[in-house]
Image: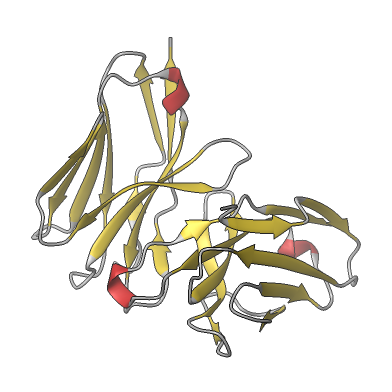
């Protein structure tokens, strides 16, 4: 398909791990991104991964990339209520602008 | 550094009115972008400017015009606002290095057209 696909909602309990999945479209995308949007705010760059990497870890965040399946995931360890937000996956096609998924709303209950 | 700033934060217009959304960045970035965000639609690109003096249409340019005033500033104009343009508008900027580019976003302008 033409779209970057994400599941729309994920609900977890505080302390659990969250895994947000994304499938992207362009196998030539060099960088893939995860952005976080808190209520009423703009988009904050969380992390990104270069396409020749399989995994990137940054504190509680782990990004896994399966280039063959064009599948990207974001794992948040020890999820906190402050992690409640919308998470957007994005790819950079043709060196111009980002193509975003529709976003996954993460709800963390205590 | 303030990063990317946008004004105004909120605006209510009547159908047919015009307005300009302002965006400025202080990161010496070459490229700037305007997106709109609608519920369940993610972000869609309206216009972008790869470098000072150039602008190009994105996915949803109809009803909008842009001006890259200088390297710092990129404005978005609605000449005759319509209810379908009710949305949250985000400006972003990037260094402008093609596939290695990382975009940084402003806080958004929430626009309602009645």
User: x%, y% of residue B1?
Assistant: 56, 53
Q: Residue at x 58, y 49 (%)?
A: B39
Q: Quadrant of the C terminus of chain B?
A: bottom right
Q: Residue furthest bottom?
A: B53
Q: Residue at x 21, y 50 (%)?
A: A72
Instruction: State whether residue B2 is above or below residue B14.
Output: above
Instruction: State whether residue B93 is above or below residue B68.
Output: above
User: x%, y% of residue B5?
Assistant: 65, 57
Question: In the displayed structure, does residue A60 sit left or right of residue A13?
Answer: left
Identify the image quadrant of residue B65: bottom right
User: x%, y% of residue A84?
Assistant: 46, 27
Q: Residue furthest front?
A: B1
User: x%, y% of residue A32?
Assistant: 27, 58
Question: In the displayed structure, does residue B29 sit left or right of residue A10?
Answer: right
| Protein image colouring | secondary structure
Q: Residue at x 37, y 62 (%)?
A: B102
Instruction: State whether residue A49 is above or below residue B53.
Output: above
């Amino acid at each position: 398909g033409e779209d970057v696909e994400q599941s729309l909602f994920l609900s977890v309990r505080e302390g659990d791990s969250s895994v947000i999945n994304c499938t992207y479209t362009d196998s030539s995308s060099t960088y893939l991104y995860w952005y976080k949007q808190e209520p009423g705010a703009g988009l904050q760059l969380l992390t990104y991964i270069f396409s020749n990497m399989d995994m990137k870890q940054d504190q509680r965040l782990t990004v896994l990339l399966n280039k063959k399946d064009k599948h990207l995931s974001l794992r948040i360890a020890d999820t906190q209520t402050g992690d409640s937000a919308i998470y957007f996956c994005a790819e950079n096609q043709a060196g111009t602008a980002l193509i975003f998924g529709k976003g996954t709303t993460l709800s963390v209950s205590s | 550094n303030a990063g990317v700033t946008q004004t105004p934060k909120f605006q209510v217009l009547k159908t047919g009115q015009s307005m300009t959304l302002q965006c400025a960045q202080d990161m010496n970035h070459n490229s700037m972008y305007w997106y709109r965000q609608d519920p369940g639609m993610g972000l869609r690109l309206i216009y972008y400017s790869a470098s000072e003096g150039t602008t190009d249409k994105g996915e949803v340019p109809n009803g909008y015009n842009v001006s890259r005033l200088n390297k710092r500033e990129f404005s978005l104009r609605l000449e005759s606002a319509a209810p379908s343009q009710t949305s949250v508008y985000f400006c972003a900027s990037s260094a402008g290095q093609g596939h290695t580019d990382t975009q940084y976003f402003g806080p958004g302008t929430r626009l309602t057209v009645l």
